[in-house]
Image (spheres, rainbow, N blue to C red):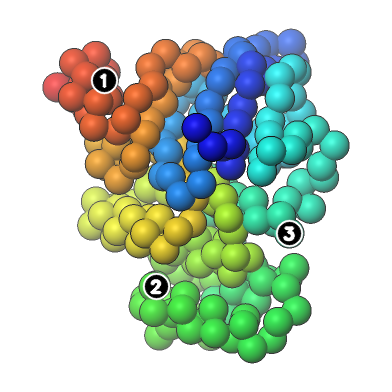
Amino acid sequence: MREPLLKLTDLKVSYGGIAAVKGINLHVQTGELVTLIGANGAGKTTTLKAIAGLLPWAGGIVEYQGKSLRQQQPAALPGQGLVMVPEGRGVFARMSILENLHMGAYIRNDTAGIATDIEKMFTLFSRLKERAAQLAGTLSGGEQQMLAMARALMAQPRLLLLDEPSMGLSPIMVEKIFDVVRDIAAQGVTILLVEQNANLALQAADRAYVMESGAITLAGTAQELLADPKVRAAYLGE
């Protein structure tokens, strides 16, 4: 098997002496859409933050493109193609949609390429195009989620970390967001998706991990987990 794009080995993360992530192993191959599902407080967001360098590791190894991220500064990771869309979206509220997109491309200096990619974002997220001059803080939750994803894509990521993209959105908007997630994956962007909506996440993903109380308790193809009675009972409401 070829070297994974992302590999976690015995990753541990603690908050004030309390173990939030308890030695997990996880990998993502180039071109995959992998989802990490589990209940609130399972350690999913903590795992993503540790990968992105936003939380220190208590132990273990995080490797990206075959190299340890231990000595890397979080601000350097987008330049290496590792980009995170945080839970809660985090758009620049007092900037316009267009300005937010330019902020996503801050590591780039290819002016023509940036302009081309902005047009691509407006094609992928058509709701944003008609509001390009609107302040991001005045958008609906779903529109802000679209903008956060579009801004991340402006950095031309190899690996996109998506944290709870459906959080707090209407069912119709959740479906639209997941359509876009599938489109992004189809364009060749590798995705690690943390998501509470296990049903939609498993339908979109290639492979999946189930996380409970800081540990990985199940792993397999998304179809295997969709068919697993324990997963169906615990996460799919059956």
28 is higher (above) or lower (below) than 96: above
Q: Position of residue 60 (x, y in %)?
A: 71, 19
69 is higher (above) or lower (below) than 187: above
Please state the total of marks drawn on the protein image: 3
* Other-residue count near label 2 (Cα within 10 Å), few / some / many at <14 / 14–19 / ≥20: some
Q: Amino acid at mark 2?
A: Phe
* Other-residue count near label 1 (Cα within 10 Å), few / some / many at <14 / 14–19 / ≥20: many
Q: Are marks 2 and 1 in contact (CB under 8 Å)?
A: no
Q: Furthest-right residue in view? A: 71
Q: Residue at x 39, y 79 (%)?
A: 123
Res 104 → quadrant: bottom right
Q: Mark 3 or mark 2, which is nearer the start of the sequence?
A: 3
Q: Residue at x 38, y 17 (%)?
A: 218
Q: Secondary structure at mark 2?
A: loop
Which quarter of the rendering shows the C terminus?
Answer: top left
Residue 162 in view (yes/no): no
Name the foreground residue: 62 vs 74: 62
Q: Residue at x 37, y 48 (%)?
A: 166
Q: Position of residue 73 (x, y in %)?
A: 82, 45
Residue topped by disc 1: 231
Residue topped by disc 3: 79
The answer for how far apart the CA atoms under marks 2 and 3 are is: 24 Å
* Other-residue count near label 3 (Cα within 10 Å), few / some / many at <14 / 14–19 / ≥20: some
The answer for how far apart the CA atoms under marks 2 and 1 are is: 32 Å
Q: Is residue 5 left or right of residue 132?
A: right
Res 212 → quadrant: top left
Residue topped by disc 2: 125
Q: Closer to the observer: label 2 or label 3?
A: 3
